[in-house]
Each structure stands twice: as C-alpha cells, then as structure tokens.
Image (cartoon, rainbow, N blue to C red):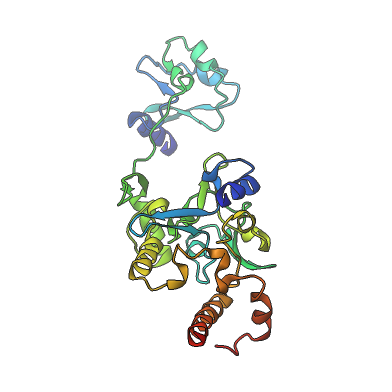
Amino acid sequence: MCRTACAIRKAGVCNPEKSRIRVIQMDECDRYMPLVCQNCEDAPCIAACPKEAISRIDDQVVRTVIDYNKCVGCKMCLNACSFGTIGFDEDRGRPFKCDLCGGDPLCVHFCKPGALTLKDSAMIQYDQARASALRRTAGMKR
Amino acid sequence: MNQGEITTEQTESNVMRYFQVNDQCNGCLACVQNCPANALRAEDSNANRVLSHNMARCARCGNCWRICPQKAIEFQFMLENGWDEVKSLELVFCSVCGVPIYTVDYRRTLSEKLGTQSEPTCSKHRDEVTRAAKAHFLKGKSPDIRPDIRPDIRPDIRPDIRPDIRSDKRGGAI
C-alpha cells in the first residue's frame, strides 16, 4: 500500500516500481523491511553528483533533495547510495528519491498496520531508550 | 593544408562516414561551386588540391551528390540513418544478479568522488542494510518487534502517550 500510494502521489501512476519507498524481503528471518532515503548527514549521493544537483535542505524537515534543473541523469547518485533508495525514471531520464513529502509522508497514512511513522532522527535514540525503560519498569511491577 | 590533412585522415580511418568521396573524383570542384551552405572547400597547397567538408555547415541537401559529374560523392551514408560507434567501454556487472550496471571508468569516477570502493551491486542488491538487519533479527536482539505482537498495541509506539513525553522530558529520562 505504501508503495502504491507513493507512486501515485509522486509519479502520478499506479506503478509501485516508481515508488520512493522500497520493501525488501529477508527470507532467512521471514521479515519485510521498508527502505527509504536515510537523508544521510554525510551523504554519498551529494559527494558523487558531478553537477552539484543534490543538496540538503531544512524547511519543514531536514532532507536531501535533487534539483532537476541541474541534474543530467548520470546515475552517479544511484550507484553511490549504499541503501539503493534512489530510483531512476527511465521515461523522464532522471533519478528520484524520497523527499519525505515535505514532512507529511503519504506512505505513513496508508500503512495499514501502522508500521510506518515519521520521526526526527535525533529522537529515534530517545524513543528506543524510552521503550526499553518502559519494558523494564513493566517487568518490575510484575 | 593542415585542416585538409586531418579530414583526409578521418575519412581513411572511417571516423567520418557520413560524407565520403571515392576514387572517381577528379577535382573539378563542381561540388564546391554548387554547395548552397558553403560546406565544401578546396585548397591548392604545394602539389595537391585538397577538398574539405564541414559537417557543421552541411545542410544535407544532397546537391553535391546530385550534380557531381563523376558520381564521386557518396552521400547515401548520410541518408542511411545508421549509427557510428564512437566509444566502447568495459562493463561492470552486479556481483549478485549479473546485470550490467556501469562501466569500469564510471566505477573509477565514482570511487574517486566517494573515496571508497565497494562491491559492484545493482540498487536492488545493495544489501548492506539487509545484511545488517538480518544479523540483527537472527540474533534475536529485539524482543519488541516480534511478529506475534501486533504493532498497534505495542506500548512504545502508541501515539496517544508519545507526544507529550517527547516534548516535556526530552533528555531528562535518558
């Protein structure tokens, strides 16, 4: 659902291949894992781009965006990304990536089990610490 | 002249295939006279008459070919709609599925820019994350994401309790 919703909003077509979100399957442990652009702080795609078309901006959320006026479609960013989360639109000859929908990602709304949420990367560690603290206190009460 | 020599060399090595003049040419220069775009030029230097063609000026009208009394101009190459190979580079293949991803030279450019060299993989098999996640899950280090616990009843992601604690006690609890 998240992939279809993303493709419809971002590419205007009902084709999950054009989605900015990827879901990888891990057969060994019987799990799926969604993957989007990690908006790396020291982003390899920014370093690799020969036209300086990729930059980090901070409007609603901190994110890495592609300036399509500068992009020439050389796919350097695709091959530099260690997560493989930049896709390439062969019809338009240009790459695409998750831009977090400007702070309100559609995939989050469409994820039925509620597995997707948008969090500030600085807060993730705190949330995890809090969750484990909650588990510990729950154990003590028992 | 210098430029004439270059053109001759190119024609011989078949680099410029579009406009060719065969051995029938006797240097009458009717083509030069009749070219509406001034794309043909002749120069008499030392002992030779050198005929040059300028591809940028040429309008592909075929006038030279039509009027040449010796039928020496081979204009059909320009009308063939063919392709000339201009470069051939060695490919690098995905180490998992074997699809061609980029060239050896592309890989060099990329590693120069990034300062690192990683295994060549297509984006579908860019599995550094997958491997890390597998290692993580197989070790069983995360009891809070067991599939038997439904995510909507997990206490740590309940939206109703999260925001206020996040905003008030940030840093204090850690």
Residue A13: percent from left, percent from top: 61, 40
Residue B27: percent from left, percent from top: 43, 18
Outermost residue, top side: B69
Give the residue at x 53% y 78%.
Answer: A131
Left or right of B46: which side holds A137? Answer: right
Q: Quadrant of residue B15?
A: top left
Outermost residue, bottom side: B172
Q: A128 or A58: which is nearer to us?
A: A128
Residue B153: percent from left, percent from top: 57, 67
With respect to residue B3, does A31 lie above or below?
A: below
Count of marks placed on residues:
0
With respect to residue B173, does B6 lie above or below?
A: above
Q: B83 or B171: which is nearer to us?
A: B171
With respect to residue B15, does A56 lie above or below?
A: below
With respect to residue A5, does B159 lie above or below?
A: below
Residue A26: percent from left, percent from top: 38, 56
